[in-house]
Image: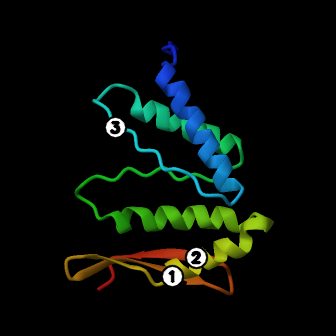
Amino acid sequence: MFKPPERASHVELRKIVRIALERIRLGRPARSVIMVGLRGVGKTVLLNQMQRDAEAAGIQTVYVEAPESRSLPAILAPKLCVALIRMSRIDAAKEAAIKGLRALAGVRIRMGRRVVEAIIFSQRSARFQVCSGLQ
């Protein structure tokens, strides 16, 4: 499989993101990164590589595509739940993950007047479920 050479700007951006992730790991503030560019310049390829870099460093990641036709909470909540469940299996992160799951518990995602999903978290079993099509 042909892999095009990495652009100098990509190398620099990956370095900036690695520094930001390490600052976050240490509990320090970090700068946000926003990537913009024309279609086909490699934004998604770069994001995928950054995700692999982060996971190789032991950082939990979530991949989210957000089409304009869906609400952001409807996209984010289930993905966040999965990440929090993974984190709850790590002793050092368990308490924070459970706290995050409690915060998401009972979140209702609305489309117009109809609730389409609700996130339910059971403290006893440390499980969550997404119920779809609720009225």
> Which quadrant of the rendered structure holds the C terminus?
bottom left
Q: Mark 2 points at which residue?
A: 101
Q: How crowded is mark 1: few (under 14 residues within 10 Å), some or many (20 or more)?
A: many
- Of all residues, the one furthest to the left in this rendering is 112
Per the rendering, the mark at residue 105 is: 1
Question: Which of the two residues, 1 or 45, is positioned nearer the viewer here?
Answer: 45
Instruction: Look at label 1 and name its amino acid.
Output: Ala
Residue at mark 3 to residue at mark 2: CA–CA distance? 32 Å
Task: Answer yes or no: is residue 128 visible.
Answer: yes
Question: Which of the two residues, 129 or 9, is positioned nearer the viewer here?
Answer: 9
**Residue 51 coordinates in the image, percent (x, y):** 56, 41
Residue at mark 1 to residue at mark 2: CA–CA distance? 6 Å
**Residue 98 coordinates in the image, percent (x, y):** 65, 77
Above or below for 78 versus 112: above
Judged from the image, the secondary structure of the residue bearing numbered disc 2 is helix
**Residue 61 coordinates in the image, percent (x, y):** 57, 51
For marks 3 and 2, the one nearer the N-term is: 3
For marks 1 and 3, the one nearer the N-term is: 3
Front tag of 1 and 3: 3
Judged from the image, the secondary structure of the residue bearing numbered disc 1 is loop
In the rendered structure, the answer to whether residue 57 lies left or right of residue 12 reads right
Q: Residues within 10 Å of mark 3 (few under 14, many from 20)?
A: few
Q: Residues within 10 Å of mark 2 (few under 14, many from 20)?
A: many
Q: Give the number of callouts.
A: 3
Q: Are marks 3 and 2 in contact (CB under 8 Å)?
A: no
Above or below for 78 versus 125: above
Q: Mark 3 points at which residue?
A: 36
Instruction: Look at label 3 and name its amino acid.
Output: Val
Q: Are marks 1 and 2 in contact (CB under 8 Å)?
A: yes
Residue at left offset 48%, top offset 50%: 32
Task: Answer yes or no: is residue 59 visible.
Answer: no
Instruction: Look at label 2 and name its amino acid.
Output: Leu
